[in-house]
Amino acid sequence: MAIWLTENSKIIVQGITGSEGMKHSRRMLASGAQVVGGVNARKAGQTVDFDGTTLPVFGTVKEAIERTGADVSVVFVPPKFTKDAVVEAIDAEIPLAVVITEGVPVHDTAYFWAYAVEKGNATRIIGPNCPGIASPGKSNAGIIPADITSPGRIGLVSKSGTLTYQMMYELRDIGFSTCVGIGGDPIIGTTHIDALQAFQDDPETDAIVMIGEIGGDAEERAAAYIEQHVTKPVVGYVAGFTAPEGKTMGHAGAIVSGSAGTAQAKKEALEKVGVRVGKTPSETAVLMREIMNKL
């Protein structure tokens, strides 16, 4: 079983006619994902061809859902249009919106996240500034390479896109149930805790890898959640041990202020509740390999 994205998921792409939307729609289709159409109000009624697969372009998310039965939207629109695109997806009550776009203003993300809550959380938001979600062998929604790993029984949740890919590759022989890149912006939709809960509840996930990074307190809150609610083995990695204070590193949310948000503090919080934390991504993979070999 996978969390949130399965072989039955039907995906639409908001921004399918743009360069990024075109490129990654082609990749998603090649991976076996059910991409069933796209949305662009200015090109409604047209079609887009992907190596022999012809997809319709709809004027609205609501119409796309009505015509195709879509239950996932992947958002590939420029930052200044992202808020409106996500609000439209929320109004259409699509169950999952995966927001790939980088550089979305924080107040825009705060707006559409609060809007989703106000609407009763009918739409789960992953991102923004994320690589998306992949359930190997089943489906792929976003920009995660489909050929770097295999299906298996490890769940992965990560703030970092590239570290998501590295962990998937290093444990490719064991494989993953679902890999979720939640993004590293200061405000995001789906959190570490959301993914931890879903993996804990998934009978086909045996262990969990959690990748965090400096900045904020998401990892400390995840540690507290693990202590109270997660019985499956968890291994972790926290990026940014050598980051200088006050300098943003990579993601907009990755910044250390004084003693808050440091990699060391996060590592200690996780280890305190029994999470084994690797010093490097490769060491983290070794820790997970040891756990899986004992299960």
Image (tube, rainbow, N blue to C red):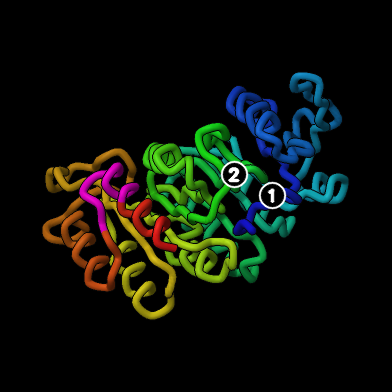
| Secondary structure that dominates the magenta span | helix
- Tell which circle, 1 or 2, labels the residue nearer the N-terminal end: 1
User: Where is residue 9 drawn, in percent x and y?
Assistant: 73, 50
Specify whether 197 is left or right of 69. Answer: left
Q: Nearer the viewer, mark 1 or mark 2?
A: 2
103 up-or-down from 265: above or below: above
Q: Secondary structure at mark 1?
A: strand
- Residue that protrudes farthest toward the top in the picture: 51
Locate the C terminus by quadrant.
bottom left
Q: Given the current orientation, which residue lies at the most extreme bottom position?
A: 228
- Left or right relative to 109: residue 228: left
Say which residue appears at 79% left-offset and 33% top-offset.
57
Q: Quadrant of residue 116?
A: bottom right
Q: Which residue is mark 2?
A: 136
Instruction: Report the span colored magenta.
Output: 277-286
Quadrant of image for the N terminus: bottom right
Q: Which residue is mark 1?
A: 72
* Circle 1 Cα neighbour tier, 10 Å, few/some/many (<14 / 14–19 / ≥20): many
- Tell me if residue 73 comes above or below residue 39 in the rendering: below
Q: Amino acid at mark 2?
A: Pro
Q: Look at the image and tell me whether residue 79 can be seen.
A: no
Query: Seen in the image, is 34 located left or right of residue 139?
Result: right
Where is residue 227? Give x, y as percent.
34, 77
Residue in front for this viewpoint, 130 or 247:
130
User: Which residue is at a point 50% across and 34% down the rendered structure image?
Assistant: 148
Is residue 244 shown in magenta?
no
